[in-house]
Image (cartoon, rainbow, N blue to C red):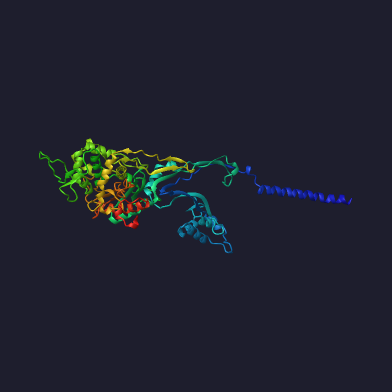
Amino acid sequence: MQLSKNLKFYFPVVILLGLAAYSSYSLIKAHFIIDVDKLPQYDFCDEIAPVRGGIYCSAFGREPYPLVRSMPAWRYRLDPVLLKKSKVIPPGEKTPRSPKAQAKTIATQLGLPPKNVFAMLEKTRGPGFQNQYLGVSDSKAVHDILSNRSIVAGIKIEETYFRKYFESNRLSHVIKGINEKFNRYLCGTRGEIRGKLDANGDLIKDKIELNIPPKHGADVILTVDNFLQKTVEEELAAGVVEYGAGSGWCVILDVKTGKVLAMATYPEMDLQKTYDIKDPVTLNKVIGYVYEPGSVMKVITAAAAIDCGFAKPDTRYSTKRDEKDSNGAYKYYRLPNDSHKMDPVITVKDAIVESSNIVIGKLGYDMGPKRVYGYMRRFGFGRRVGIELPREEIGILWDYRKWNKATMSRAPIGQGISVTPIQMASAYQTIANDGIRKKPYIVDKIVDAEKNDLLSHQEDPGESVIKASTAHTVREMMLDVTTPKGTARRAKVKGYSVAGKTGTAQKTKEGVKGYLPGLYVATFCGIVPSGVVKRYPDDPEPVPPKIVVLVSLDFDEKRRYHAGGNTAGPVFKRITEKAMRYLEVVPDRLDELEEEDY
């Protein structure tokens, strides 16, 4: 009976408690237990950017060295409202940090003026006020501080990549050209992701319908050697400043392969800056500048005359300008004067060493325009060399049938025609390589992210331009150019024979008749070693040629020292001395060295 009374009392209580528990559960479920599938969802589709490929240069006997690469980094944005509302208390302290103190930390870490960040704090309305751009940094230390919510708040962080130039603006003109020429390899292929976003705009991981990862860009490996490029840029810049030139350029070619070991134009470009494509500072002058070469062309004329049997090194010519034939008429039309007095009669070899305009002008005139033009074309003038860089110029070499009497004596000495520096260096490479012209190239290979070759340089069999015996003879003729007898004694490289030639070309300007008074392009181009000097008398062969170095200084103002021998020559000397040591080239002039030097 008592049990029955207790049941009657507790039963309703149990029922009420059960109803209360059920109601509480329903409320909790409604407010805290979210059924994701019943929440609003939105379709999402986006592209995933690939990582851009890098550009590398060669390093003598070592792995390719990065000049520019895309490096992982963090992009930082500021939400000033969130920063101000958050309570930031550093460990071990009781007082929250003020918004201004946090702003100072942000500015310090990202290298920003504090006043800029203070101004961002005040911008709490308007478009994008919650995502104000602060900057990008690859520093993990910076990331550790700005992601620590006990130091700063209101910072939004995104993973990204940025282009890092490991050697500042080194090889700037070439890098710009490579980016343009090989963009389709460097840029990679975008990926794609498609799925659902939740109400907060976050991707629902188990609702991803498509996820195609991006294909990262390929790396371009150049033939340029990092040390030689550094040497060229430093010495070229110093030479331009020392002699008061407006600009300058230099290229080094490997004799046997034609590959570019260094290529520089000064002034350099700022790779972080965006330029208009027509801005003159973007011009890679080694491939895109057209100018009258001057006396460096005399070597080509002499090589042509010897190769076709028209003349020999000891063939003698009068240095008299106004020479007449048996009928009393002038034999040569408007021969240019020589810059200094010479003997009444000299050889073709002496005309190269002393740089005689009169003798080489007569030689070319006597050979005839068809023959001179033909050899110039074979040496590569009047046509692109085909290097893997954009905006290479052709130069100006009129068909011989358009040559007048003046051209017949001026073209052989480098006047009335125009070339690019890479054409001239390539012509000297031909003479250095026993008459075989190798196409200059600057890209060794392109490799994908898995290091598979996508593009690789194929060995060039070369083009026979002159006989090997002719090339050897011409190099012998050039040996004395760097002696006191020649025009470039300041280009002499201790311990090494140099087969070189100077050029001091008067400048022209489009739309202006004649030459610009007092303005010149000074050049020295040399083959080192010469390939005609034996290390020891009983050696079977001479020390072979290794490199061709061309240096030019372009003068925009009248300067006392403007000749190729006393401006470009010393710059050539300094570059070549360092290059020979670095490349470990065996000296062939032991008589010029002390015993401890070899």
Residue closer to the observer: 48 or 549: 549
Which quadrant of the figure contains the C terminus?
bottom left
Which image quadrant for residue 358? top left
For this rendering, which residue is in front, 432 or 355? 432
Residue 389 found in image quarter: top left
Q: Residue furthest front?
A: 538
Residue 404 in view (yes/no): no
Front residue of 91/438: it is: 438
Say which residue appears at 48% left-offset and 45% top-offset.
51
Question: In the image, is 120 to the left or to the right of 496?
Answer: right
Q: Which residue is situated farthest in the top direction here?
A: 401
Identified at 88% across, 52% down, the residue is 2
How many numbered marks, from 0 up?
0
Residue at 69% x, 48% y is 27
Q: Position of residue 222 (x, y in %)?
A: 40, 45
Relative image position of residue 511 (x, y in whole percent) = 24, 44
Judge left or right: residue 77 versus residue 598. right
Tell me: 125 left or right of 3: left
Q: Position of residue 183 (x, y in %)?
A: 42, 42
Judge by depth and name the residue closer to the eye, 326 or 108: 326
Q: Is residue 371 visible?
A: yes
Counting from the top left corner in percent of width and height, residue 407 is at 21, 40
